[in-house]
Amino acid sequence: MTGIQLRNVTFGYRKKDKLLDNINLNIESGSFIGITGINGSGKTTFAFLLNGLVPQEIPGYYSGNTCVEGVDTRSKPVSYFSSKVGLVFQNPDQMIFNLTVFEEVAFGLRNLDKQSVIDRVKNSLQSVGLKGFENRDPQTLSFGQKQKLCMACILAVDPQYIVLDEVTSMLDYKSTVQLYDILVSLHKKGKTVIIIEHDTDWLAKYANRVIILHGGKIRFYGTPKQVFSNKKTLSDLGIKIPADL
Amino acid sequence: MKRSYLIFQIFILFGLSAYVLYNRNVFTAAVMSLLLAALSLINKNHIVYYRRLKYIFGVSIFVVLFQVVFNRTVPMDIRLANGLLTSFKLFSISFLVLWFTSNISFSQLVESLNFLKPDLRLLIIMSLSLIPLIFKELEMIQTIQKSRAVKFNFFSVHKIIPALLVPLLHRIFQQAQNLSLAIISRGYE
């Protein structure tokens, strides 16, 4: 079975406060999905569901099933799902801790032989435009470069699903365009891209499915055209209507 | 720089630090401080040394005054000697650490720890790599609080501590939590 399936997933730190409420969704392999919603709507928690961080590392009241390629995220450790679902965090400083760019990218490749690690690191750095940065201290990179480095870290592992949690929220326009170019090329190679984004213009342009989360529930799901045609409701929910539909 | 030379330097640092800490003689402590100050002149970064150590001068004077004013159970000459000894020790240790950190980069320091188990090495790398981030955050919080009209001087310590420490601790714990989630999500068990 391919794709990610969520069946009646409910999660909250306390039983009464539900961060995610009865989520039912089928994420097909190879799709480009955009998720948006106001602050506190459950977007990041949703992202943490997809590789098993919720409920394994972030405990709370969890019910339902999340299956990645048919495997329940509770049945195996997070390390098992990390090779299938790559998660890029909003702030790259939260991911980067190694001394060189090479070591940072190679961190997730501990089980491979030395030559494979070198090849994968080089390829992933090249695909994000950081070729030649191998020996640089990651802390000396610009914010945009750090974000690309985080992308390279995930790409080196070669997961089928790439989940990005508001990665463009602190990037300038040029860096955002570059990042989306990378995502589009990955999507063309057959990867599943799931991006959490506040700027709906990007979602309208690139995503082939859009999810609107509100109060932990999926309020809308469909193509950008279908979803963003509900202008009145979306405005009431505090969602920006994209300029070009 | 060779690893053996690095380890040699670490041993020298620990050896001299141990000597400074266990020394009970004011005269030798003063000689040690002066010797280290003279040695720092050889280093081309000695201006940076003095810029960083200016705070230590203030703290040293405070330590001497504290001993003289509050330690009234012993005679005045011993109070003064105790204050001076502590100040010289503080000064020497600060000099040694500055000397060491200005000659060895962070990556070289970690490289010298290769003999440790991978898990322990990772733990040390993560802890050490968080230190510059903490200072960066502290600087940022200081700027933010200054823009909110918090004055940073000696007489407003009671206001500075919550204004700096509360947001700093919050950010550090948040950062640590997010870092651990990021590492787990990258397949580390």
Image: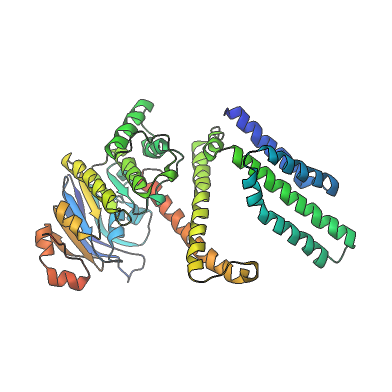
A18 vs B126: above or below: below
Residue A218 visible here: yes
State which quarter of the image contains the C terminus of chain A: bottom left
Query: In the image as oriented, which residue stretches furthest toward the top?
Result: A115
Image x and y of residue A184, in percent: 19, 45
Image x and y of residue A139, in percent: 44, 45
Report the residue at 9% width, 61% height from top. Answer: A226
Q: How many marks?
A: 0
Report the residue at 13% width, 52% height from top. Answer: A208
Residue B188 horizontal side relative to residue A169, left or right:
right
Q: Quadrant of residue A84?
A: top left
Q: Quadrant of residue B102?
A: top right
Image x and y of residue A233, in percent: 15, 71
Closer to the camera in the image, A32 or A128: A128
Report the residue at 49% width, 57% height from top. Answer: B137
Image x and y of residue A21, in percent: 25, 66
